[in-house]
Image (tube, grey):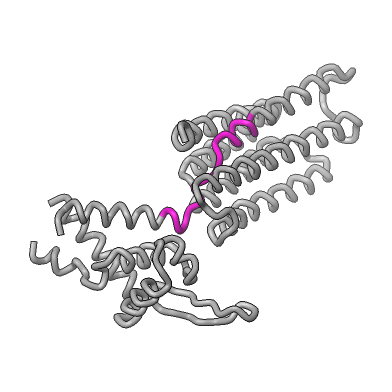
């Protein structure tokens, strides 16, 4: 039991953060607007949660311009994907156990 | 956290994974109608060939040109219906019709399909037409499987079915027409109904 709980990651302990990771592990990348629409989060909410994930290097952010519009793309890092997988497996184990 | 919370987390994760990578508003009704168009088109072609004096199809005749036109009409009606009904369903579901997912869906679908279509036109121009029906089924099946990772699962099974029919059809070149009817007519109606009853009924 203790082992399983070790794999429950505090970084994913919020709906929006869990949501960001869920989207990024099955897509090459997602931009800010797409994440916002899918998660139904506000700008500030999404920005602060994505920053938290960026800080622990679970996601990577690329800023660029499409024409004259700024565009921010989010990518899941290798580490992020691995940690997310562990987290989901732990959740599933907890449900079974 | 209670196990109810964990369950909610898991279902939220699954839901977001699907919503962000799959276009789920594909219309089953459009599949059913495409099947009927194919049956009508095939029925017309069959009538045309059997009432002609020869009773079989040759490549340069007038009848062949009419059948090509018949085929193009079936295609246009099917695609038109699919676009109309799918757009309508996407609007109802609040899903965007033109985003990264639908773009990927279309590209993955169209690349094998267009490659196959051009290949079929090339071999037709070289007067090899025994396998046309089988090749259409094969390439269509491959296109469906390729596109299926970006939409509902039923599309993948329709793809496998078309490939199997195409391969059996290639073994019996004389019956290509009937395998075509089975693949493009009957199977569209079958899988379209499956999708319709699973996802659309009562919506």
> In the rendered view of the protein, which quadrant contains the N terminus of chain B?
bottom left
Q: Quadrant of residue B68?
A: top right
Q: Main secondary structure of the magenta part?
A: helix
The front one of B93 and A24 is B93
Residue A29 among magenta residues: no
User: Going by the image, does B34 lie left or right of B191?
Assistant: right
Residue B136 is situated, as x and y percent measured from the top left of the image, at 67, 40
Q: Is residue B86 above or below residue B6?
A: above
Residue A2 is situated, as x and y percent measured from the top left of the image, at 8, 65
Q: Is residue A35 above or below residue B40?
A: below
> Which residues make up the magenta segment?
B18-35
Residue B23 is situated, as x and y percent measured from the top left of the image, at 51, 51
Q: Which residue is drawn at the image coordinates 55% and 48% (left, top)?
A: B91
User: Going by the image, does A10 lie left or right of B132?
Assistant: left
Q: Which residue is drawn at the image coordinates 60% and 46% (left, top)?
A: B87
The front one of A72 and B18 is A72
The answer to whether residue A17 of the structure is visible from this angle is: yes
Q: Which residue is drawn at the image coordinates 73% and 35% (left, top)?
A: B74
């Amino acid at each position: 039991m203790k082992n399983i709980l070790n794999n429950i990651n505090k970084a994913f302990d919020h709906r929006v953060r869990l949501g960001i990771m869920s989207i990024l592990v099955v897509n090459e990348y997602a931009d800010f607007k797409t994440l916002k629409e899918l998660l139904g989060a506000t700008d500030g909410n999404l920005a602060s949660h994505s920053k938290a994930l960026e800080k622990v290097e679970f996601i990577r952010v690329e800023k660029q311009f499409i024409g004259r519009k700024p565009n921010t793309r989010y990518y899941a890092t290798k580490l992020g994907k691995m940690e997310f997988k562990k987290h989901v497996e732990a959740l599933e184990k907890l449900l079974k156990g | 956290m209670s196990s109810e919370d964990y369950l909610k987390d898991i279902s939220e994760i699954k839901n977001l994974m699907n919503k962000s990578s799959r276009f789920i508003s594909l219309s089953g009704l459009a599949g059913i109608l495409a099947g009927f168009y194919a049956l009508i088109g095939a029925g017309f072609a069959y009538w045309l060939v059997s009432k002609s004096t020869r009773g079989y199809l040759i490549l340069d005749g007038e009848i062949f040109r009419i059948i090509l036109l018949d085929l193009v009409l079936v295609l246009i009606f099917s695609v038109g219906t699919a676009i109309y009904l799918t757009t309508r369903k996407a609007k109802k579901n609040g899903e965007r019709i033109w985003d990264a997912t639908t773009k990927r869906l279309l590209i993955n679908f169209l690349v094998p399909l267009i490659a196959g279509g051009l290949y079929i036109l090339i071999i037709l121009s070289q007067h090899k037409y025994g396998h046309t029906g089988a090749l259409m089924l094969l390439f269509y099946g491959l296109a469906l499987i390729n596109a299926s990772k970006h939409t509902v699962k039923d599309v993948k099974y329709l793809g496998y079915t078309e490939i199997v029919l195409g391969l059996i059809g290639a073994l019996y070149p004389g019956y290509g027409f009937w395998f075509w009817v089975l693949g493009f007519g009957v199977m569209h109606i079958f899988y379209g109904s499956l999708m319709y009853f699973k996802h659309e009924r009562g919506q």
